[in-house]
Image (spheres, rainbow, N blue to C red):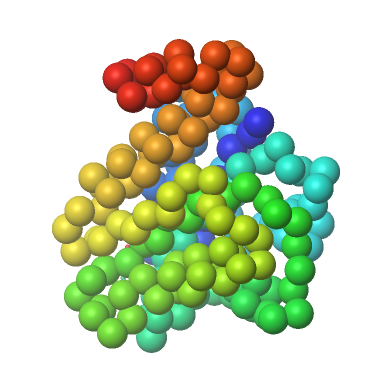
Amino acid sequence: MKAVILYATRSGTSEYLANGLLAELEKNKIDADCNDIATIDFETEFTQENDDNVYLFVITTVEGGNPTESLEDFYDWIMNEDTTTSNFKYSIFGVGDSRYTETYQKVSRQIKERMSTVVGEPVIPCAEGDNKETIHADFDEWTAKVKQYFSYSSTKYRRYPFIGYLRNTFLV
Ligand SMILES: Cc1cc2nc3c(=O)[nH]c(=O)nc-3n(C[C@H](O)[C@H](O)[C@H](O)COP(=O)(O)O)c2cc1C
């Protein structure tokens, strides 16, 4: 199982967080890579062949509640009601700022809702980071859940789920 981190940033926050997650996963010997979502050919990426991947989206909402330029192609594709895709594994961390009250997290929330229909439920609960105050704590909390998912899903703990449960509950 591999973590594929995909970020969509304009001024660097999501990229910074995504790289922090990559470092943390690598430190824990979890196979992972990290890419700008604009570099992904999502029509061929999200296929059955890649169903061992867990896609971790770190995506920013910018003014007017819009996607960043780098997210536009993915956004148009996933929001299109004719789009179908495999039931790939994913979770989403939305980056925004609650001072933008009307459109706070608009893009990550839209994508989250759309993906729960077209892809399925996330394997790790989605989360949001508020750049007004708690973004780093929010991100650390999500990162812990990502690590927990990978350690629980590893073969060793799948064979002995109770040990995995204890380990995740008391050590993560
Ligand atoms: C001009 C501008 C408009 C923004 N509009 C929104 C918005 O509508 N909703 C939201 O949640 N955050 C909004 N934000 C906050 C950004 O999401 C936040 O600053 C984020 O950390 C930027 O991430 P990035 O560095 O990955 O681009 C806006 C920020 C700026 C500078």
Residue 151, compared with residue 17, is above or below; it is above
Count of picture labels:
0
The percent position of residue 166, horizontal first and vertical second, equals: 37, 18
Residue 17, compared with residue 160, is above or below; it is below
The residue lying furthest to the left in this view is 133
User: Is 71 on the left or on the right of 170, as rendered?
Assistant: right
Q: Which residue is drawn at 68% across and 80% down?
A: 80
Q: Which residue is drawn at 74% across and 43% down?
A: 51
Q: Quadrant of the C terminus?
A: top left
Hey, which quadrant is residue 133 in on the image? bottom left
Return the residue nearer the eye: 116 or 3: 116
Q: State whether residue 74 appears in this view.
A: no
Return the residue nearer the eye: 108 or 87: 87
Q: State whether residue 131 appears in this view.
A: yes
Q: Residue at x 33, y 46 (%)?
A: 139
Residue 163, compared with residue 165, is above or below; it is above
Q: In which quarter of the image is the N terminus?
A: top right
User: Is 136 on the left or on the right of 110, as rendered?
Assistant: left
Residue 144, compared with residue 134, is above or below; it is above
User: Is 75 on the left or on the right of 98, as rendered?
Assistant: right
Q: Which residue is drawn at 20% across and 53% down?
A: 134
The percent position of residue 111, horizontal first and vertical second, equals: 53, 69
